[in-house]
Amino acid sequence: MQLLIVLKIPSHPVNGATRLKTVQMDNGEPEPSYEGIAAAFAKAKAEKEKQEAQGLKPTSVDAGKASRAGEVHFKAAHGIVIAFFTWILILHVLGIYLFTSGFLLTRLVLDHKSECAVPPIEGALSYSSGSPETGCWHPKTFEKAIIILVDALRYDFTVPFPADGSDETAHQFHNAIPVLYETAVNHPNNAFLLPFIADPPTTTLQRLKGLTTGTLPTFIDAGSNFAATAIDEDNLIAQLYNSSKRIVHLGDDTWHSLFPGYFEPNLTRPYDSFNVWDLHTVDNGVTDHLFPLMHSSNTSKWDVVIGHYLGVDHAGHRYGPDHPAMNAKLNQMDGIIRRMINQLDDSTLLVVMGDHGMDAKGDHGGESDDEIQAALWMYTKQKVFGRSSPDYITPPATAKDRPVAQIDLVPTLSLLLGMPVPFNNLGKPIEEAFIGAKGDGYQNLAIVNRLTAAQIHRYQHEYALARGIDESTRSSSLTLWTAAHAAWDLANGKAHAGHYQSVYSAFAAYQQETLSICRGLWARFDIPRMLNGVIILFSTLVVLGVYARGIEGDRTELTPALLIHGGIGTVLGSIAGFAITFALTSLPKEHVLVCAAALGGMIGVSSAFWYIRLRLISPFPTTIWGWMSVGFTLLLSIGFAANSFTIWEDEILLYFLCTFGVVAALSSFRQKAVADQALGCYHSVLFIILTRIASLSRLCREEQMPYCKSTYYASANSSTSAIWQLAIPYAIALLIPVFIQGYYQGTRSYQGSAVMWLNLALRFGLLLSAAFWTMDAADDGDWYPWLGETIKTSKIVVAQITFAIALAFGYSTFNWSKPLLSIENQATSSTSQHAHVAADGGRTSITIFGYANVHGSRYALLITVWYLAIALVQKPMGAGALAIATWQIFSLLEIIDTNKLSDSPIGPIVLGLLGSFHFFKTGHQATLASIQWETAFIPLRTIRYPWSPLLVILNHFGAHILCAVAVPAIVLWKQPPKKKGLLGDVAKAVGTHLLFYATVNLATTVWAGHLRRHLMLYRIFSPRFMVGGAALVIVDLFCIFIAVGGTRISFLSVAEVFGFPG
Amino acid sequence: MSTTVIGGAPAKPRAPATPIDLLNNDTAKLYTHMHPILVLSLYAYQFPSIVADPVTGLTKTLIPLSILQVVYVALCLPPTGSGSGSASGQPEKRKPGEKKKVVPGKVESGINGKIIPAFLSLLLSTVVAAPLLTTTLVLFGAPITTHHAHTLLCGAHIAFLSIIPLVYVHGVDGATWREAVALLLPLDEVYGGMLGAVSGAWLGAIPIPLDW
């Protein structure tokens, strides 16, 4: 343990101030008195090695020159390391891109449009196809329609609870919107209520596409929720628009990006859809503009009104379904619907529906039952609706009974309004809407089903032609089609209901079969792309593995060769690929280009490895630590092949981290120095206990139930923090700076800028972020209603100030801080046992405090800077977990130091485990629904690019980022200032850290690809693959530009005092 | 090698620990092979009841297990120290090198020399090792608020399997135990047994998440 170093110098009459200045001076002329010391140093040949390690700045002219040369050399080497890792990053991105483009499903969009005058099959009975005035393919039932979309209206919100015979207690979301159920039961000919099943992904944009085109979504569109693009497929809105219907839209502005220009400009009122913290603006806007339109004086101005309410969805996102705000919101909707019923005229159809449901916390996006089960309710003053059986008058008690698909709305609405069924539709008309008031209109039902099935048949035919699909893939549906026709011909002319009932079921069977064929067909994966993506990721992993673990000595010496060969290879490969795309135009261009570039890079870098082959060593581990690193990474990666291990990843990481802690404690007993034993043991036990405490913060995914209890929010059905949780950030603000100071004080490094930053700025920033979350809770809970807007404004200001402290003030501190050293002059010989004699003689000595950890203490400031920035965007519970993560990082640094493991892969690997572990502890899961979108509004009122996505990333991958930033500290903590090859050590550690994420990413990618037909693909494997890919790219970016970039600043700062190692 | 001895004893270099030899008689040589079979049969026999009702099953198994372990150490292993009943005595007196020479002469010493140390190691394993291992299990992720009996019984089983023989042969000598913790003891039957039990417990956690 080198706590401090004492220099004894000859008894020159030098005062302390001069000495201090001399030691710290940068490239200036040395003081004459100091020259003498330097000369004395030069003579002490035996002390030379020691002197270098102790690293007092060389002061002779030659040494100054050497130092300047060293600086140039360092900057160049540093730039090359950054460039090399960037090259790795590019390969990662290429591999992930190629795999993703083949894995996320794609569907060919046909441009065909249905036409009013061209029915898919010759006229049904005596009805001849006409104009929109009477109904295109089928006589229309309604002139006008009001379509109300209540975002996230889950089916169980609308039916009474508890169901008969059940003694469960009702939640806030139960029985709050009874109007739909009441009307369906009391006026079965005027209304019906049915479960309305969404096709995942359950994001609003995807749902709107399904609800207007009638086709199945594909996953590739799931990511475009932030930037919606226009639908160019045939759809209901376009059909209405083309037949000169006037469409008014009110509410969620997603519609406008999907259907630009289709809506009546002077009546339409779009509202920003993404501010999930705002429950009322959109809803009040819709209501305020809807009722005037329903007034008899205005009904002639429009044909279809679409109102999209967002309040229920936002209440779910913000508070969760089991919250008084949800109850109030649903009650409000109930009142609005009752008003609509009163004002509705006879020729207008009123539709109220949800586009998706919400999970237990109020989020959606996935495919759990709660997320896909929405409600559909239709109402009219005419008595046109019916039921095929009197038992069906009561709406189903659960969404498992008699559900209809959301795509069924498209043919239903089209035919009710006299529109042609959109060309790509796969849904079928809803029975209740066409069977007639008596419940026996099977002829009508058969006709509409025949029409719809014929359109599906036409579409399938065109699709098969366009895609070159063999007839055999749909032979089963073609058989059904023939059978349905035979039944139709048989029944035609005989007006017996029984015959038409069989016709109806025959056409419905054809539709069902076609739908399931399409589901299979569009789940087609582009295997070559996926395979090539995996190959690129695998070979990049090998290159990274050899670079990180298989090079002897300082890798910065070899990085230029690797970079140049790899870079040239990549460029030549791209050129070759470009040429190939011209020569063989049939191949997909970007696929060839990506493959050729990656292949070229691999060939290039392999040649470089051949060139440096004498420096290559086996990358396979030789110590227990190495085996543990490999073991943890591989066990985790293999586990992703099973859904159980993927689901329980958080517990597995806890297990691995504790194992590391225990082995570190055991290893501490083997250390020679008693201090190392004691410190190592203490920090190992601390590390284990902190891991276990952090593990108490849990946000369970649906699949973990019932073996998991969520603690992240106030309750399992909530997304707000409990009152006691608000105290966590305050406790952290008081304690964490003290703990970090402790780690600095161990080496007397707590001085200089560290005092200002850790004690004042960091603590103040943490206090502000605690204040933010209190204000946020006050705003959420409406504790101080009279404050109104003030609290909203001030919490945003507080958040912005916190960010400024972290990223502006913090980075300035990090950038311009001197090394954390101070020098004391002692008149008598030091009695300190930590004294290291650099030069003999004299009664005066200089003591340099903070010397032993000058690199580590300087760099670790960056960890705390990022900690502050990330802590703000985590909920109170997450802030607690993140504080523990920071504490653990410092304790890990001590473990690594006392066990002398800075060269071992275990440090960076444990940081990878720690980052992944705290990902779960900050309230995340590998599911789309666990993304905390509302983070975007912490320092901002509205969506602003690029900040809003960045904030969400900072929240979602906060733990990964924090640990990535900490990687260089593993090799810098308590290293002598002039130790050679530190930059190479940093590159090695960073490479090892990336190796962990690259392995996990490769594993999740391979498993997702391999298990592409697995039942749980979209629930478990695909989200984990997406998290793995995103985490890899983000960790790459932060490791390269923040961590390695940060070492440049801290190295230059240390070198200002100690010079560069020659 | 560690030169530190706690308890204020003078810091003299310790001789490297030597492997523990079995007692040099036929019973020991025979029973040492039978013992693992007996223990495994016990678990195999009790397995259905442990799965059906873990708490009852584990509790019931604990008693035969402790008897088996006590019999094993008494029959096969040399007790710690040289004097009778010194299992918890003065560890400084013992020199590890002497152990083997002393032991053969002690074969007939009967109850005082064997049974009491065996029961003392059982007691120590129950009182000290079992709670310690239970805490470790909780730290590794066992539930904090529920399933206390399950965890405690699991800890007790690991303690009985791994710690009883170790206490019996090494006593409570701090330095030896520190070597044991630091994985510095030579790999003999007793120490290997402990390492095996602990690694088995570690590996045994792997199937926990599986839902089939």
Image: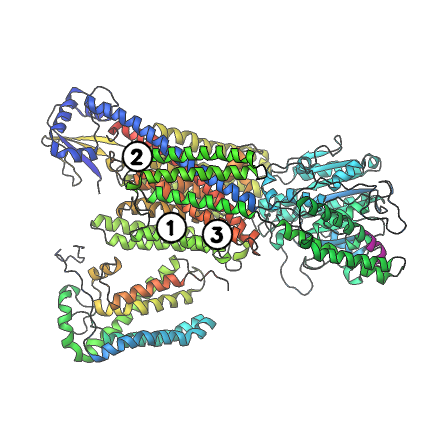
Tell me the element at label 3: loop
Residue A740, x across and y down, in percent: 34, 41
**Residue at horizontal 25 percent and vertical 28 percent from the top:** A1059
Circle nearer the N terminus (3, 1): 1
What residue sits right under mark 3 in the picture?
A698
Up-down: is A323 above or below A561? Answer: below
Looking at the image, residue A1023 sits to the left or right of residue A870; the answer is right
Q: Is residue A445 magenta?
A: yes
Q: Give me the disc on residue A557.
A: 2
Residue A45, x across and y down, in percent: 12, 32
Residue A631, x across and y down, in percent: 37, 54
Tell me the element at label 1: helix
Tell me the element at label 2: helix
Circle nearer the N terminus (1, 2): 2
Q: Nearer the viewer, residue A64 or A654?
A: A64
- Would you identify the image quadrant in which residue B91 lies? bottom left
Q: Are marks 1 and 2 in contact (CB under 8 Å)?
A: no
Residue B4, x across and y down, in percent: 17, 55
What residue sits right under mark 1 in the picture?
A690
Up-down: is A999 above or below A859? Answer: below
Chain where mark 3 sits: A
Q: Is residue A550 magenta?
A: no
Viewer-nearest of labels 1 and 2?
2
Magenta stretch, residue numbers: A437-448
Q: Which amino acid does the dot numbered 3 rest on?
A: Arg
Question: Spatial distance from mark 2 to mark 3, Cα to Cα?
Answer: 45 Å
User: In which quadrant will I find the N terminus of chain A?
Assistant: top left
